Amino acid sequence: MEREALVRIPSFPLAAFLWPARSSVSQWELLPLILMVVGLFRWAAGLWGYSGFEKPPLFGDYEAQRHWMEVTTHLPISQWYFHDLEWWGLDYPPLTAYHSWICGKIGSLIDPAWFALHDSRGSHDPTLKIFMRATVLVSEYLIYIPAAVIFVRRFSRLSGVPAWTSSVALVAILMQPATILIDHVHFQYNTVMLGFVLASMSSMLAGRDFWACFFFVMALGFKQMALYYAFSVFAYLLGVCVFHHTNTPKFNIPKFIGIALATVVSFAILLLPIVAGTLSEASRGITAHPGGAHPPLPLFADLAKHLNTEAFYYPVIEQLVQMIHRVFPFARGLFEDKVANFWCAMNVVIKLKKYPAEMLQKGALVATLAAIVPPNLILFLRPNKHPGLLPLAFATTAWGFFLFSYQVHEKSVLLPLMPMTLLLAGRQGLGKDTRAWVGFANILGCWTMYPLLQRVDLRVPYTVLTLLWAYLLGLPPTSLNAYFQDGSSIWSQWATAFIHGFFYLTMAFWHVLDMFVVAPKDKPDLWVVANVGVGAAGFSLCYLWCLGSLVIESEILPPSWTGKEAKTKSE
């Protein structure tokens, strides 16, 4: 088998680099070395510029995160979601606000000028940049890195993968270029949310379903984008209640009630500081509106007619409604920028924005449900079939959301890429077929984010990190190592190589055009639109590959239908 061959012969550069540690170094001695190396790459990537550097008037995501730190440290908690919404108003869930408060408090001890409300807007203090970069790195090493290490170890052990091969996969996962480019170069804290999702998935593999609920609620509490995984979490936990270690349906009511209670308690813990703080401040005469007026409730205007604005509970209702309004921006339309998903690609042919918003919302809902129901139905019916089903179902569902859901950002591609990249740590994960598809998805994902990175002069880290990862895993454009393996259908190998090769050549040709050919004046976004179309097509293939792999691994169809029977006999 491929994974056994990997142990005998290093078949790509990353395996060759770690080859000396295969037998002479303890895995627990190797782990600190891995964490130091991947940390060094993260810090080095952070030496480049960031989103909004010297780019007025709003100065990008870096300024948004810095601004939230000053808002949360200087204003009463009841005013966090109401303050000056035109200048990066807080629009992430409460756990992001609490995280911003902690970072802002620590930073203010070093230099209060970094977070002086109103006076520090657009600050590009180089020492502040070091602090902000450090907050990303420390947050990642507190949440994401431990969760990734634990998940990979558990997933590999359950899949029968040797410890050294698991370490190779861990390095590949932690060196994932898109994550480093967005969090450590462009600047965000996506890995905190992804770390909580990883902890939830790891808890599922360990059978700790209550902890799985808690960690996933924390992921939702940090970034609403974690909803991409919500259907898979629900399908898995419901499946565990119905098919508890057996294929015979038997509803486990106590377990279901326990999971529901764990979810409710987790949300209560998440919201407690906001609710308690708002009530405490209201009792002291501090409100969300220092001017004293009570504007209409967003989203629920009719509800206000039945509420007493002077009642003790009204500030809490107002706070929660405002939070929902800020976190879910339905008023912004189907999409804001050009993203490599179905709707933006379709907009090239049919101008979608001429249609009513309600119609587009319903269309997005129907299309998203059509894409995510099949993988989650499989996960519900086979929750304990094989550990590999979990990342496959998460990846397929996240691809469905990315391709078809409402209000998608180009950075949202991190969500399907994370569980898909986890497949490297599973059975035959470093084999050529899985490595080729995981590599293709990651390189295509970075390529679709190039216009975003290019706007803030981040071409060099994009090029270096993407090509480095491709080289380490033996992927195009640096190598064809990930194609043509023994024991597989020669037709499927050629088909994969031809399809991926077409996309890789298209990506390379696109870069040449973008660099040397000026777009026509009447079509200034021509190259960006081409990026959207190619990216959407490639991501659709990734969705189909994940769904097909999920169907095969779940054995939900007869083996003769999927070809697994013949494959098993050949092995």
Image: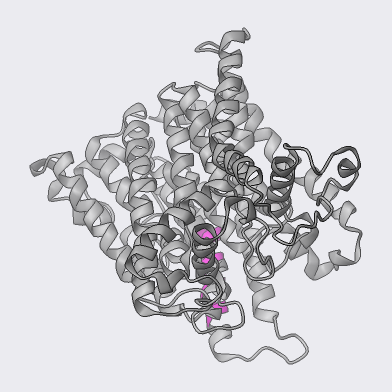
Residue in the picture at 37% in, 52% down:
140
Q: Residue 415: x, y in percent?
A: 54, 50
Does residue 218 appear left or right of residue 482 in this picture? Answer: right
What secondary structure prevails in the magenta region? helix
Q: Is residue 107 above or below residue 157?
A: below
Residue in the picture at 58% in, 33% down:
267
Q: Is residue 260 above or below residue 306?
A: above
Does residue 444 appear left or right of residue 30 in this picture? Answer: right
Number of numbered tags placed on the structure image? 0
Tell whether position 293 is magenta.
no
Q: Residue 465: x, y in percent?
A: 38, 68
The residue range painted magenta reads: 497-511
In terms of depth relative to the viewer, which is nearer, 509 or 74? 74
Query: Which scheme is used to colour this image of the protein?
Result: one colour
Does residue 373 appear left or right of residue 248 in this picture? Answer: right
Q: Residue 488: x, y in percent?
A: 44, 42
In the rendered image, the residue lying farthest to the front is: 284
| Res 23 quadrant in image | top left
Residue in the picture at 53% in, 67% down:
67
Q: Is residue 184 visible?
A: yes
In terms of depth relative to the viewer, which is nearer, 109 or 540? 109
Does residue 265 appear left or right of residue 170 in this picture? Answer: right
Q: Is residue 413 above or below residue 84?
A: above
Tell whether position 503 is magenta.
yes
